[in-house]
Amino acid sequence: MTKNSIWEFSNPLKFKKLAGILIPIFGIIAFVCVITGLSWGFFYTPDDYKQGPLVKIIYVHVPSAFLAINIYLMMFLASLIWLIRRHHLSALAAKAAAPVGLAMTFIAIVSGAFWGKPTWGTYWVWDPRLTAFAILTLFYIGYIILWTAEDEPDKAADLTSILCLVGSVFALLSRYAVLFWNQGLHQGASLSLDKEKNVADVFYQPLLFSIIGFVFLFLFLLLIRMRTEIWTRQINAIQQKLGK
Amino acid sequence: MSFTANGTAILGLVFFITVIFVSALGFDINSTDFNLIGPSLIWVTALLSVLLSAKNLIQDDFRDGSLDLLLISPIPLELVLALKAFAHWISISLPIILICPVISVLFTIPFDNLIILIIGLFLGTPALSFIAILGASLTFSLRRSSILMPILIMPFYIPTLVFGVKIVNFTENTNEYHINGLLILLAITLLSMSVLPFAAAMGVKSCLK
């Protein structure tokens, strides 16, 4: 393995050294961006002409929904890397990411519910997007539970990776199955490369800050959780050596 | 192999009929859309029967050691698991499909809908068995596997369930629509049949390492 390649960090010691540097940096970026995005969004943008101040939920709702989906994508990639290259940190990353992803899904659903009540008149509808998120929650929960059911780390990593890979296919299928079901109340994507459909610029800029902040918050939490997991395994290994 | 397991086939069918009958009593019998509930109920109950009977697909072989023999046998494990899933389909889903015309009398399902329901079950239920074998392979060596497996596997059943129920209950009775829905069901089944035995074999192998 060549030096300076990403595989070098499969060595836990090197990873910990890097994580030690990156954790405070990511923490600061996340803190600054989230504070900027949220306070800019909450206090310095005009109210929407139809929804009034309610539109400001977007600064929590969109970033968390964005992360909820992308964290699952990241877990998919990490599981694939684990199954192909037996890269231990990759399995750890997938394990560490899952609870954060679940939390993001919850935040998206709950903030959406509070947004939906005054605007649509209901907390919950069986709308394709909402249903897809509920299904995503089930996949996250199953994944996390499977991790807790098996003590031996390598075997647990194998099983959860298989679940995650196959699960992604079926999660995608479910997404289109519920789309077939009926048309929903939820609007289309707030952010897309197609500029025409985006939200207005006034809301767009703080939203971007907020999303960047949430992404770095995720990376910050991910690295902390991975480092803790490495420590836990080292302690277990030491205890086993001591014959406890 | 799994076919002879202590009359699971008959128990599965009895379970199906009991659940259908009891939950039908839970609905308002005089309500007008009772015949709309029927297909949904049949699908959900079929799904539960498959799920509950699939728990021992691999676990029994694991406990009495025959799984190790299957692993070192000349037949690839993928094929063994695929056959197990197929046998499971014959023993659980096929009797359910065959009894559907009788059940549909209880719900006064119209004949046209019944035909589509039965074709849908034929095309869709193999996917359920193949998904179940994946769940069994992931959980057979774990503690609390009986509660774990439904939690892991239920979400996988959503696409099949949604399409299976939706094509029966669709209000516009255009043939094209039904055929498209049935083709999608078939696609899900074929996908499950081609991919899941390999994933399940991977799970079994990593558990026995």
Image (cartoon, coloured by chain):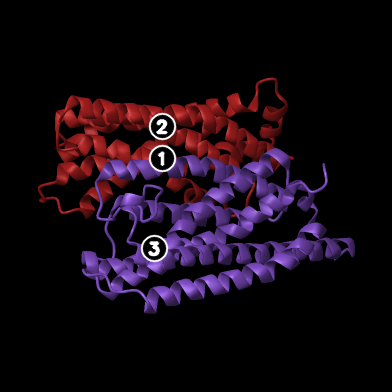
Which amino acid type is shown beneath numbered disc 3?
Answer: Tyr
* Label 1 Cα crowd, 10 Å radius (few <14 / some 14-19 / many 20+): some
User: Which residue is label 1 attached to?
Assistant: A173
Q: Secondary structure at mark 3?
A: helix
Question: Seen from this angle, which residue lies furthest right?
Answer: A242
Chain with colour red in the figure: B
The residue under label 2 is B188
Could you tell me residue A179's position as x and y percent? Answer: 31, 44
* Residue B152 image point, x, y percent: 50, 49
Residue A204: numbered disc: 3
- Tag 2 subunit: B
**Residue pictured at 57% horizontal, 46% vertical:** A76
Where does the image place residue A151, in percent across and percent down from the top left?
69, 56
Residue A1 vertical placement versus B196 (above, below): below
Q: Quadrant of the C terminus of chain B?
A: top right
Q: Is residue B86 left or right of residue B98?
A: right
At x 59% / y 69%, what residue is drawn? A29
**What chain is the purple one?**
A
